[in-house]
Image: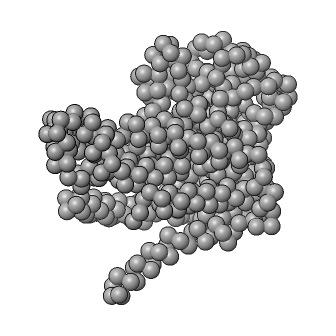
Amino acid sequence: MKKILTAVAMVAALAISGCGDSSDTSTPAAGASSASGVSGNLTVLAAASLTESFNKIGKDFETANPNVKVTFSYGGSSGLAQQITSGAPADVFASASPATMKTVTDAGDANGEATVFVKNQLVVAVTKGNPKGIRTLADLTEPGLKVALCAEQVPCGAAARKALAAANVKVTPVTLEQDVKAALSKVKLGEVDAALVYRTDAKAATADVDGIEFPESSGAINDYPIVTLKSAPNPSAAAAFVAYVQSGPALDVLVEAGFQKP
Amino acid sequence: MPPALAIPAIAGLVFLVLPLFGLLWRAPWSTLPERLTEPGILAALRLSLLTATLATAVSLVLGVPLAWLLARTEFPGRRFVRALVTVPLVLPPVVGGVALLLVFGRRGLLGGWLDATFGVSLPFTTAGVVAAEAFVAMPFLVISVEGALRGADARYEEAASTLGATRWTAFRRVTLPLIAPGVAAGAVLCWARALGEFGATITFAGNFPGRTQTMPLAVYLALEQDLDAAIVLSLVLLVVSIGILAALRDKWVAP
């Protein structure tokens, strides 16, 4: 027992000294001067499918505004919306569906109406090289084929449902994943043969998966709205970030990732 | 009672109980009856109780002998093995789920062979849920039973041996009855941990209603859309688990 206590004390001491170090090094950076007016920390809650693009856009934004430190929290849009309406401190919310955004704007937690900044559509993500020869949505119904979908509570699941209904295809998935990245990782791990994910997610994982386009996905295009939040601790940086996301350079990043312009 | 103990004790109690009170306070009492009869809730509850019980059974069959091995035998590296057994206790359950996939998944260490030889595939099945829960919960049982074994006097077993009992008979007829309360306490702890299991389950077994969607998974997904539904599910899980634990405690696990 004594040994355990000593170990715990040591770990705690390390953790505390570690914290001290990091705050020491970050102070001078925060004090650096810049041309733009915005500064401070900016917290952005964004749909999981925006991970790669927003990481890049965030870096570009920080380069343009050296006094700002952007922190992203990615997750299923619905869960993020739930966090916002429960009072999570954040500045900007970018959702993968207008329906999810509506829960935030309806609750009066956003500044006005959200703006759609990109669109995304679904593809069938399959194991690299497409060993099962999947070509269409209807191929997903083949017996013995393991398919992952998103749970219908999250936008990619709602879109998958819509696309499957439009194609009049009945797929029996083996699992309903909690967000699009989780569905994709099941394909990457080889646990399922195919998953319906966003084109951008398949594109971000080209090393492990192939994305197969299908015509019915145009019937289930997802609009991505973005908005500044009313309780934003840093409203000026929030407004600057939302404006930046809709600017030319940021749109280029998003289009390169596979999104479509609104 | 000295205030130096009383004040933190009361603060600790409030800290643990207040969130439960929050659930009760925010619960949608007026629509509770119709929400409780939604078919999804019953399916998730049934699956949760079934898998937690099976995981406890698996843990008993494998965990009690393992605890005996750790407590009653000497072999090189025993301390190291003991440390290994407790690893799932500190491992984040999600990591446990990924690790299980890497072993029992279709492309895993054993999974491919299991699938090809026996046609057994654990991910996305109810058996996969049981495996994930047993992986996370069994260490609780092993630690508890090992403690009971160390507390039990080994001379009773030696006496049994001098009277001609084999080691197996001594274990069955002398040791097991001696440590029964420890085994029961460990099993209850193991069952409770399995019932609340989330991370390893959603990672390894996925989420499908009626097959792998246990109550914690249903709560998490309900939270994505409907806070009230999540609260109702949480209340059901809370009431059922407290009820069962209280019943077991009176019967087998006297304090």
Residue found at the very far front of the displayed protein: B163
Question: Residue A196 vs residue B248: left or right?
Answer: right
Front residue of A25 and A102 = A102
Q: Residue at x 67, y 72 (%)?
A: B25
Question: Residue A103 vs residue B105: left or right?
Answer: right
Front residue of B17 and A38 = B17
Residue A79, given in percent of the width and then of the height, sits at: 65, 52
Q: Is residue A105 visible?
A: no
State whether residue A85 is above or below residue A192: below
State whether residue A108 is above or below residue A132: below
Q: Residue at x 20, y 52 (%)?
A: B153
Residue A242, given in percent of the width and then of the height, sits at: 67, 54
Quadrant of the rendered image containing residue B167: top left
Question: Residue A171 vs residue B196: left or right?
Answer: right
Residue A237, given in percent of the width and then of the height, sits at: 60, 62
Q: Residue at x 25, y 39 (%)?
A: B170
Query: Is the image coloured rainbow, by chain, by secondary structure, or in one colour?
Result: one colour
Q: Quick one: quadrant of the N terminus of chain A?
A: bottom left
Quadrant of the rendered image containing residue B137: top left
Q: Is residue A145 visible?
A: yes
Front residue of A73 and B163 = B163
Quadrant of the rendered image containing residue A37: bottom right
Q: Residue at x 68, y 38 (%)?
A: B210
How many marks the image carries: the answer is 0
Residue B54, given in percent of the width and then of the height, sits at: 52, 39
